[in-house]
Amino acid sequence: MSLNLATLLQTSAHATPDAPALTIGPRTLSYATLDGHARRFASALRRLGVRPGQHVALLLPNVPQFTIAYYGAHTRRLPGGAAQRAGHRAGGGSATSTTPTRPCSSPGRASWRPRNRASTAWPTASSLIVARADATDTSAPAGAESFTALVGGSDPVDDHHTTMPDDTAVILYTSGTTGKPKGAELTHFNMFYNADYVRTDLLKVQAGDVALATLPLFHSFGQTVVQNGMLSTGGHVVLLPRFTPDDAFGLMARHGVTLFAGVPTMYFALLHHPGADAYDLSSLRLCVSGGSAMPVEVMRAFDDKYGVNILEGYGLSETSPVASFNRLDVPKKAGSIGLPIRGVQFRLEDDQGGVVRDVDTPGEICIKGHNVMRGYYKRPEATAEAIRDGWFHSGDIGIVDADGYYRIVDRKKDMILRGGFNVYPREVEEVLYAHPAIGEAAVVGVPHDSHGEEVHAVVACKPGKTVTADEVVAWCKEQLAAYKYPRVVHVRDSLPKGPTGKILKRVLRDELVGA
């Protein structure tokens, strides 16, 4: 059986060659052009000596070169004749894989990553950096060649890798919010069927649908939900390399965007942008949110203002990423992450590994299904710790209601133990977001001599609003149990965020502990 990510693009290019595939600025690439560039990139990799089993690390923002290199790396035909290709089919793991990387990194600045990933090429927006095939120090590339010249000067290949379903297609590095990033090895089967769920069940992509890609494509959310989900069915993707409310609104209005995927901080920025009313968003039919918990107040306000339906879901790099979602065909439950997706199972476990069977009782979310990674790249101990008895242990604490809908209570490592009582930051943050002046909020535990940990809240105000720390404490004290409300509140202009817009609690915690 051959199952290869490149076929997602190739199938659409065959069915709708002249349809718009990617747009950036004034330039639009048709499916035929995009597929042709990917095939030429594949040829360039082979000519430069990139071999099966090596990795192509993509140091790219949301630009066409990312998508060209992403699919092109999988398109490349194996060198040698039919016998060698047959030999490859008999064994697993020797296919070329891609390793999307945050574009501010470079082979020199992030040298531990290329060595760990055994990467041999790093496409950037302007060039293709190629390491020597026999180099032991891949932080010292042999040279760089123009990306455009390499693609333009190569003949397109006519086929893709013959791959096994469990061959590694993509290595996605975790965000590292709780420690050093680990590389999740995702197979062609993982990524292919996660994209299939997105297009058929989640987004129900229709002819003429247009999606705005402002989530980073190097991140699992943007890569699967926007790029793979849309391009696998002939959708049109409009690229926005750097999110700003004005740019996002302008592109949505100009191109008639019908589908928008974002993280909560993006929705908040759009909701409260002072110039929002100048843009026509009447074409927008569906929004999806993930990456971090969506405050219920923000979701309801956005739905009401723009007449849309934000569906919230859940997933991790290790689950390709989509694991659960609210659904279009049934009423959503605001504040929940919905139901496990087709072919995926959830269960909750207590601290002793027992299965939690009672509704509304917290436990660690464990996941089993076609979306779960094969393991962490060259980290067998970490793999054994994360995947036990076939279940991936997420590190997230959740509850399930009588209808089977799951809610995230919090990250297991974010839980605060105050005076012997468990405090889940998510619950406190929902109260903070309900305050009329608060626009961003994060709750963390800080070591305390007598209580073990104390609850600290860090907040930023909405534009034009102000609030004092004492007012925030009083607000929370009225609505939370005595052991839950924050005793210490820090009011800041903004909160630190990662590349996807997720608030970085580890950074805040380190700052507060060191203060």
Image: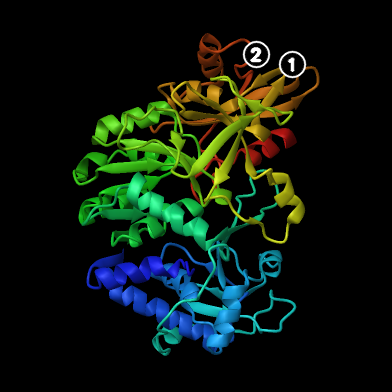
Question: Does any portion of residue 395 appear in the rendered image?
Answer: yes
Q: Is residue 365 left or right of residue 60?
A: right
Q: Is residue 390 above or below residue 449?
A: below
Expressed as whole percent of the image width and height from the top left, the position of residue 51 reads 60, 81
Give residue 483's mark: 2
Q: Amino acid at mark 2?
A: Tyr
> What is the secondary structure assignment of the residue under circle 1?
loop
Residue at image x 33%, y 54%? 212
Q: Earlier in the sequence, mark 1 or mark 2?
A: 1
Expressed as whole percent of the image width and height from the top left, the position of residue 161 reads 50, 76
Q: Is residue 503 left or right of residue 211?
A: right
Question: In which quadrant of the rendered view does residue 36 lie?
Answer: bottom left
Quick one: 336 or 242, which is closer to the camera?
A: 336
Expressed as whole percent of the image width and height from the top left, the position of residue 89 reads 57, 75
Q: Is residue 323 above or below residue 165?
A: above
How far apart in space, not on screen, are marks 1 and 2 (Cα)?
Answer: 8 Å
10 Å crowding of disc 2: few (<14), some (14-19), many (20+)? some
Question: In which quadrant of the rendered view does residue 367 lie?
Answer: top right
Q: Which residue is mark 1?
A: 419
